[in-house]
Image (cartoon, rainbow, N blue to C red):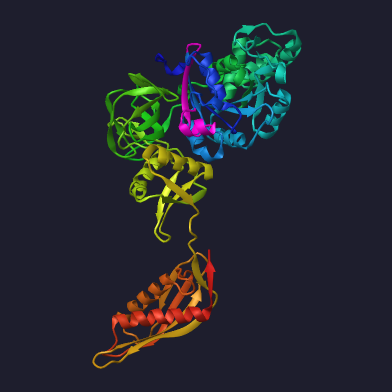
Amino acid sequence: MVKPYPQARIRNVAVIGHGGTGKTSLVEAALFATKAIDRLGRVDEGTATTDFDPEEVRRKHTVNLALAPLEWADHKINIVDAPGYPDFIGEVVCALRVAEAAIVVVDGVAGVQVQAEKGWAMAAEAGLARMVVINRLDRENSSFTRILESLQGRLPGHMVPVQIPIGAEGNFRGVVDLLSMKAFGQDGNPGEIPMEVAEDARAWRDRLVEAAAECDDALVEKYLEGTDLTPQEVVEGLRKGVQAGQVAPVLCASAVKGIGVAPLLDTIVSLVPAPDVAAPKGKHARTGEAMTLKSSPDGPLAALVFKTMADPYVGKLSYFRVYSGTLPADSQVYNASKDKMERVGTVFHLRGKHQEPTNQVVAGDIGAVAKLAETETGHTLCAKDHPVLLDPINFPRPIIAMAVEPKSKGDEDKMGQALHRLTEEDPTFHVHRDTEMKQTVASGMGEAHLEIMMERLKRKFGVDVTLTLTRVPYREAIRGTAKDQGRYVRQSGGRGQYGVCFLEVAPLPRGSGLEFVDKIVGASIPNQFIPSVEKGVKRASEEGVLAGYPIVGVRVTLFDGKHHPVDSSDIAFQIAGSMGFKEAVQQAGLALLE
């Protein structure tokens, strides 16, 4: 069981990067090295701690963020393992929102790839500390020097190696930690630096000390005077530089061999800022006034829900980060986003899917709670007498849409509610009903994203559907200007029907709707029948003329007409307006818009 830790001894880090660079394997190696797990799982065998979703096991890559808390050097490190494929960028957004630092994992062969660049930019925009782990240095054609040059050329910032490799490719057998000037092999124990890399280690150490000195004015003076910096001063200078975003430590690893894991954890403890370095900001839930919160377990509660997992049996599972105060088990909290009270039962720490109950979650820490009725991703939980809204999570907009069609009548009955449950789980997944095309449309970040959501729909809620292309909603538009009349005259003994109107149609700029202009003078059409003409015109425009699609971007001017004192009526002028509009737009020429 993880013991309670004060804020100063908590580190929250998000592990991000391009897909297939070994992020989850690195997290698994860290869990195993700290004895948080007693068996080393593998992604390709479906046994990794943080890849527990059935789709992750089947596809052999991460699709959901997962938590991996561990204990190291009397500190608690909350690792948030995030996916590397662009379809699941929303999970990366959530992970970065609750971390103080981002660890970007790059491949020792491929170097910096697209999602690494995107993740780096997102972390920089969020003001997070950043570091890089060059993983898979045991692979053929891997190169620490080449990848370091790639980092310096493609990622903004001052890249400062804090480790160098011992050996290369298949002979990669350890790292030299430049902070402690110790060598670490596969067993993770510190030892003396091998002679073959001793000279390189001293040269890299000098560069590291120089970078540390540049981050602190007092250290710069001492360094320029020729006085040696103490190991603690080097660490302190680097910590300031990392926190300010001036420097980015670069580390080496082979996750599958467990090389570089112990010095990585040491670096996180030494250089990553604690959660109490900056006071969290929000606004008053009722007045909207800006607020600065007390980042302390003694302050009023303020917690952000950053992930929701929907389960048909357990209910919703809400992951939260406490920014201020303490969230105790068996309590009541106020959802400021919904203006509702929520009953909190058991709170726990999550490691993959393993739940470990705890009495409370304090400021700076991350936890989870089940069965919150009203709470969704991005909501703030706080004290009723201190209502605050933390800054929301800004998710990217969906980029692809497909129609969802149920396979049976039973699936159709359950589909709507089940899809809504999935939108609660993933804010980058949107669903709406296209009434014009009579289709249910699901939108997401990519085709793989939508496929996984549909598989989840079947597995969790028993709803079997297919994805098809959405129908294209066409529009009709006129090409030019024309005039014509609409004449509806019926005489059949007794009261007849009489309505005549003269219309002019002209195109409007693309994207406009229908505009009706009344230019009747001299009461050729009585005032009470002008709305009837407009109603007929609008109905005809909605029905279309060329192919049955609505006509848009047209100005219709009613400039003359005729009426009968007895036979004119509302319906007569509606029909006349419809007839005149159809005749005029045909003369003007029609085009089909996609």
For the question of whether residue 170 can be seen, the reply is: yes
Left or right of 210 in this view: 28: left
Q: What stretch is highlighted in magenta?
A: 51-74
State yes or no: residue 57 in magenta: yes
Closest to the observer, 47 or 306: 47
Give the percent coordinates (x, y) of residue 415: 37, 47
- Which image quadrant: the N terminus? top left
Q: Residue furthest bottom?
A: 493
Q: Residue at x 51, y 81 (%)?
A: 587
Give the percent coordinates (x, y) of residue 463: 38, 43
Closest to the observer, 346 or 501: 346
Closest to the observer, 239 or 369: 369
Closest to the observer, 409 or 449: 409
For the question of whether residue 326 can be seen, the reply is: no
Give the percent coordinates (x, y) of residue 44: 56, 27
Q: Which residue is drawn at 60% across and 31% down?
A: 20
